[in-house]
Every structure is written in C-alpha cells, then in structure tokens.
Amino acid sequence: MKKLKIGYLALSKLSWKTPRIEALAKDTAAGLAKLEGCELVAPDGLITSEKEARSGAEMLASAGIDLLVMHFVTFPAGALIPVIAERIQAPIVLLANPEGPCAGKMWEQNSFCGANLGAFVMRRLGKRYGYLKVTPSETPAALKKFLAAARGITAMKNCRIGLVGGRVPGFYTSNFDEMKTRAKLGTAVEVADLVEVVDAAGKLTPAQLAEARAVVKRSSSKVNNVPEHELELAAKMFGAFKVLTAKYDLEALAIRCWPEFSDIFGIAPCAVIGLLNDAGIPASCEGDVPGAITMVLLKALAGGGIPLFVDLISYDEKANTGVIWHCGAAPVSLCRSFEETEYRLHFRVDGGDKKGVTNDFSLKPGPVTLTKLDQDADGHFRMLIAKGEAVDTEPFIRGNPLTIRFDPPVKDLIDTIMLKGFEHHYTVIHADVREELLQYCAWMDIEPVMPEVK
C-alpha cells in the first residue's frame, strides 16, 4: 500500500517562541515521522510569519500531501491560517495541546484558543477539517481516524474500477451515475466486455497459467464432483482477470457473473471472484460498481484486510443477529476453517449442480463493519454503517454464510434498510471502522445512515 503523505506545520507567534515551545513542535514531528505506512513532509522550525506560512504551504502542496496537521503550538498571528488553508487541498487536522498555568501564572501557549480561531477560518473557507487536543506523545494514536479517512479519500481519487460485462438483468441496485461518482469521489470506471475475458484466457503464457493453477489448487481443501477441466477453466479465468486488471490499471472489478457468463466461459465465476479478492483485487458480483467502490474504501480505511461482497438474507430479532451470505465467492483467507473449504458445482446455474465452480465454507468470526455507499432517489450520496460481532457459524447452507450480532437493534437496522430503500448488496470487513467511515463521510459530504446503538 502506498505511503500516506502527512504534512506538518507548527504555528506560533515569533514573540512567544521559547526553547520549550520549539521542543513541543519537535516532539510532535518526531512522533508523526514514526507513523507506520506514512511519510512526514515538514519544513524546519516554527511558522511565525506570512512569508514562512506561504513557503511552507507551497512546499507541502508540491509534495502532494494527503493530510495536513496544523499544530497550534501557541496562539498564532491569525493571518497565517488562511495563507496556509488556501494553498492546501488536502484535509486539515487542527492540533492543540492541553496546558495549565506556568511559572508566574503565565498561560504560555493559548493553544486551544488558537485552534478555535483555526476552526472559524476553516469553516468560512469551506475546508475539510477536524481537530484534536492532545499531548505530543498522544498525537499519533489520536490521528488514527483522520489518517484512515485521508487514506480513503486518496484511494478513491486514484481508483479505477473495471466494469466487466455491465450489470445483470433487473439489478437496478447496481446502477450508478458514472459522472457524479467521478466528480464526487474521483473514481473512474473502465468498461470491458465478457468476450475480452475469454480472449485473454486463451492468450495466457505458460508461466501465467502455471501461476493461476497453483492459486486454484491451494485455495480449497477438497474438490466435490467438479471435473478437472472446470478447475482448469477457473485457472484460466483467474489469469485472464489478472491480465485485464494490469492492462487497464484497475484497482477493483465489478463482474456481470450471470446469466451468460457460464455459457460463454463454461463455468460460473464465483470461486474466481474469491481468488481475486484474496489476490488483493476487490471484486464484486452482478456488475455492482458501487459495491466494488465500497470494498476499495473499506480496504483503505482498515489499512489493509480483505472486504466481502454479500447479501443480507435473514435476521433474528430475539438474538439480534443477521446472516450475510453469497453463493461461494468469498476469499478463502476469511474462512472459518480451511478443512471446510470445498470446490463444488454451482447450486443454481443451469438448474443446479451442472457447472462449477463455487468455494463453499463458512466465514470466520470477529469484529465486523457492514456498509454500503449508494445514491438516494434524489441523487445524493449516503453510506449505510452498522457495526457488529461475527459469531462462529456452522456451514448450514451452501455458499458462504456468516452470522453477525449487530451493535444496534437488528429491527432498527432492517427498518432503516427497508424504509430508506437501501440496496440489497452490502460490503463487510473484519474490522471496526465505524469511526473511520464517519470521518470519511464528514469530509466527503456523504450522509451517514446508522441505526442507533441502544
């Protein structure tokens, strides 16, 4: 994953500059420089004049920072703030330090008051910002949700989704406004035909095919009635999707997995979709581009990890649980037990148990976040967010089931979904990223939709 560039500017008044004030800035910068997966970009010393503010901001802008930490080491000259803000397009975190009276009853920094002034200016300039009041040693941990949201913004801005074959018939939930999505998130969509997958599969090099065969072989513990030639087709399909991903410089895929794919290729793509997700290429079923976008976002916010694309198929109000599932397209790295994994013929294609390939197993327990980005009837973007704990789930149905005990009442979650008309596809990641999603929504002017936790 590409390193996140963090800009740091320490603001002060020249007349307030002391060795202790300078040390506060140095300690803060040193902590930021140690953040994993990040690169610190900062000029030397305190920013005390408009000239220094201009120079520092231009340095950070030219470096292409993803987030600016504007540290109010003391109350600064107010004119510094807009000089910086006007030159920085990245989100800004206003950082203040807690303090108490010093020798001589002096209020040495007036740090929070400076950040308060900064908030006023940011709001009036229409900037994306957040704020913290922590010590230098606490700053790296306190920045977690802001770093994640900045990572999400950057990931979406640089994201290219491959829509392979279009959406499936009647799945209006997979529709999206391509240009509004690009204008809002920066995400581009590249359209490819299913025939191109077949063509790429036929042109794989021996090395590419050998690599794909090895991935298929190691991704399930057993094979249940799937012919060898269909496993070979799965390897060819996986290799073909990897070729297309490289050809079009794609971050993720949304695949029209039925009705014609199994006829054109000879098998359904379910198990292969799981292989793609395990290979770090988020892939959604049924041509759902918003689903693929949400998967990329979850991966970015969690700092890695593998997202799931699922249906919510049942719920139990008394147990406060819901069951998520899809038809054998989950990545094997998220299995409950590798010994349960099993390549099978698809239970619906051509009437059921006629063609492969699915990878059937239950999914693993642990903290999860369920979410989905969509556009409401009036076109505005919104995000469903629900946190929960996935519990140990027996493989009680074909495909990939998982039972989740939700934090909010499941009745309220279902009422929210149904009465607000959300899509029937969702994305899930094995991580608690609720706060990160909320911060991302705040900065991107996306409506968060969450049933209350009671």
Image (cartoon, rainbow, N blue to C red):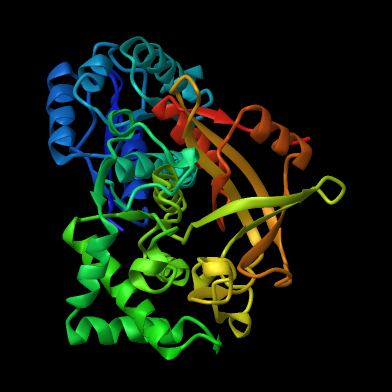
- Place of residue 133 in the rendered image (x, y in percent of width and height, measured from the top left): 49, 30
Does 283 sit left or right of 47 as displayed?
right
Quadrant location of residue 23?
top left
Does 392 sit left or right of 95 as displayed?
right
Query: On screen, 412 above or below 389?
Result: above
Quadrant location of residue 139?
top left
Query: On screen, 29 above or below 401?
Result: above
Does 48 sit left or right of 407 as displayed?
left
Query: On screen, 337 above or below 84?
Result: below
- Place of residue 450 in the rendered image (x, y in percent of width and height, measured from the top left): 63, 33
* Residue situated in front as seen by the camera: 260 or 226: 260
**Whether residue 328 is visible:** no
Does 362 sit left or right of 76 as displayed?
right
Query: On screen, 223 above or below 56?
Result: below
The single residue placed furthest to the right in the displayed view is 318
* Residue situated in front as seen by the camera: 396 or 92: 396
Which image quarter holds the N terminus? bottom left
- Place of residue 395 in the rendered image (x, y in percent of width and height, measured from the top left): 70, 72
- Place of residue 331 in the rendered image (x, y in percent of width and height, measured from the top left): 49, 69
**Whether residue 263 is visible:** yes
Which image quarter holds the C terminus? top right
Residue drawn at x 33%, y 34% as measured from the top left: 185
Residue drawn at x 24%, y 74% as measured from the top left: 201
